[in-house]
Image: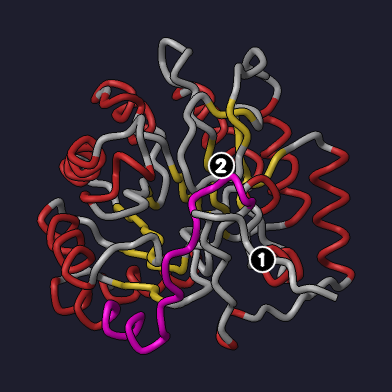
Amino acid sequence: MLKELPLAGVEPPLRKPEWMKIRLSQNKQFHGVHGLIRDLNLHTVCQEAACPNQGECWSRGTATFMILGDTCTRSCGFCNVKTGRPLSVDHDEPQRVAEAVAQMNLKYTVITSVNRDELPDGGVRIFAETIERVRESSPQCRIEVLIPDFKGSERDLRTVCEAKPAVLAHNVETVARLYLDVRPQAKYWRSLLLLARAKKMKMVTKSGIMVGLGETREDVIHLLRDLADAGCDLMTIGQYLQPTPRHLPVKQYIHPDLFRDYHQIGMELGFKHVESGPLVRSSYHAETQEALMRSEVV
């Protein structure tokens, strides 16, 4: 049998190295979380973004809730969340998220969303209401929000900050040089400005990037310096994985040694904590990162 050859001009996908192999974990807790999310008609970034840690996190009883629907108005080259015209805002969604957090008896939860650029407020009121409903039903639960850029609106950012989440996260996702290809509808400087403004509003701030998209070590160091200058407290660095053939290809699988190097550089630049590793995602072990920072402050 003849070996099938790749199409001309199309590079074959890189073979995953040993350190990228994931052991699936689906225990009773996993199925309980899956059933609860289905029954309450909720979305999680674990599912929509095809996160490689879904099995581990759900098996520990944790999940990152994605509000404002499952359809994004932007078309980032890395993201598995579908792009299109979203449905109308579901005003009952904040209460259903609160019910899920209460039933799971969570001590820490992460709430994120799709971009809703078609809404006058970018969906910020639903963000604030979700925080308030979770706090009412589960006062013991600390809340981290992973927000979009709200097209640079300081007013919308303030609305979220006034709801007083424990951590305000906004991912820059990639280095400045690659923004046009990776995040064509976003702006690097706008994300940095959002984080700097949030810090001035007395928030604990956090950001994250993916590596393996063609950036250099110097690119990453430059980005870390920019984030440190913006006052960013917490940082996550993980390996980009191509969700489908129509998404941006993986240019390189980053060796664990380089991830350790990025961790060390970030800590030397003044971050309170840097979570850096091949399988790290922005919400991975989020509760541990926030707890470590609080222990240092105390």
Residue drawn at the location 33% of the way across and 55% of the way down: 206
Q: Which residue is mark 1?
A: 5
Q: Is residue 161 above or below residue 152?
A: below
In the orientation shown, which residue stands out farthest toward the left? 229
Kind of residue at disc 1: Leu
Q: CA distance from mark 1 to mark 2?
A: 56 Å
Residue 135 disc label: 2
Q: Quadrant of the N terminus?
A: bottom right
Residue 225 falls in image quadrant: bottom left
Q: Is residue 44 above or below residue 123?
A: below
Q: Quadrant of the C terminus?
A: bottom left
Whether residue 255 appears in magenta in the rendering, the answer is yes
Residue drawn at the location 80% of the way across and 56% of the way down: 33
Tell which tag, 1 or 2, sits nearer the viewer: 1
Q: Which of pointers 1 and 2 lies earlier in the amino acid sequence? A: 1
Residue drawn at the location 65% of the way across and 28% of the way down: 69
